[in-house]
Image (cartoon, rainbow, N blue to C red):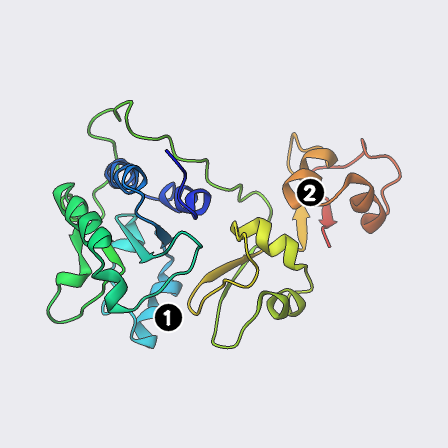
Amino acid sequence: MAKLYYDERNRRTLAELAPNTKAAAMKWYAFCEKHGIEILIYDAMRTEAEQRANVEKGVSGTMKSYHLVGQAIDFVPANENGKVSWERSWYMRDDIQKAVKEAKRLGFTWGGDWANFVDMPHLQYDKIAYGQDKKLATAPTTSVPKPAPKPSTSVSGTSVYVVKKGDTLGAIASKYKTTVAKLQAANGIKNANTIYVGQKIKVPASTYTVKRGDTLGEIASRSGVTVAKLQALNGIKDANKIRIGQKLKLQ
């Protein structure tokens, strides 16, 4: 069974969900994968600040979003070449409607069915009361694919940039004094030319505070740089001599 175009990113996003929501969402994703239904799952857990911004922009209708408690995802139809579209016609494709039907069977509510605020990208797991998805009710079956681990958040100062009309990955990289390659690696972006309006881009941190057990090699690996570069940036002669609380420049 071939992987979907956005498989790595989809699994990383699903890993953010609350336990029972994640179990149901992984079953749904396995269904999409089995039937070759190309989708991009681009949002799951949100902060209150992110939700407030969405309400202000009119793309969300409430501050009591299931995204805030890890019980919702947003997805967009894609094709085999990675092109995505939020057009209604794409959501009404036979394969996408087949996926929506399966999501409902698993306990999700589809925002496309709402009368007052139609939200076609939205699936929320309100089978469990809001904010109450704390503990997995049953052990996941062996047929549910194991999600990829959530990216490390140990590097401090990571920023999130929301793509606006006219943005390019190169311009965003220049704005944050980083590289296109680092932004692609941090966000699982295969093609630097396929970012879209509203996409959240994680910007790699520029500094890191050393914690107990850290080594310069591990910090370099997580940050996408070499040990030699970290030594040069921070005037470190001996790579084995870093101290807890030491602030390291990463760029």
- The residue at the point 12 percent across, 42 percent down is 105
- The residue at the point 29 percent across, 75 percent down is 58
* 18 and 95: which is toward the camera: 95
- For the residues labelled 1 and 2, the Cα–Cα distance comes to 34 Å
Query: In this orientation, does residue 248 appear?
Result: yes
How many badges with numbers are in the image? Answer: 2
Q: Is residue 126 above or below residue 137?
A: below
Q: Give the residue pinned by disc 1.
A: 53
Q: Secondary structure at mark 2?
A: loop
* 190 and 236: which is toward the camera: 190
Q: Quadrant of residue 159?
A: bottom right
- The residue at the point 42 percent across, 60 percent down is 83
Q: Which quarter of the rendered picture does the C terminus lie within?
A: bottom right
Q: Quadrant of residue 26?
A: top left
* Amino acid tagged 2: Gly
Q: Give the residue pinned by disc 2.
A: 245
* Amino acid tagged 1: Ala
Determine whether, in the image, residue 119 is placed left or right of residue 186: left
* 240 and 202: which is toward the camera: 202
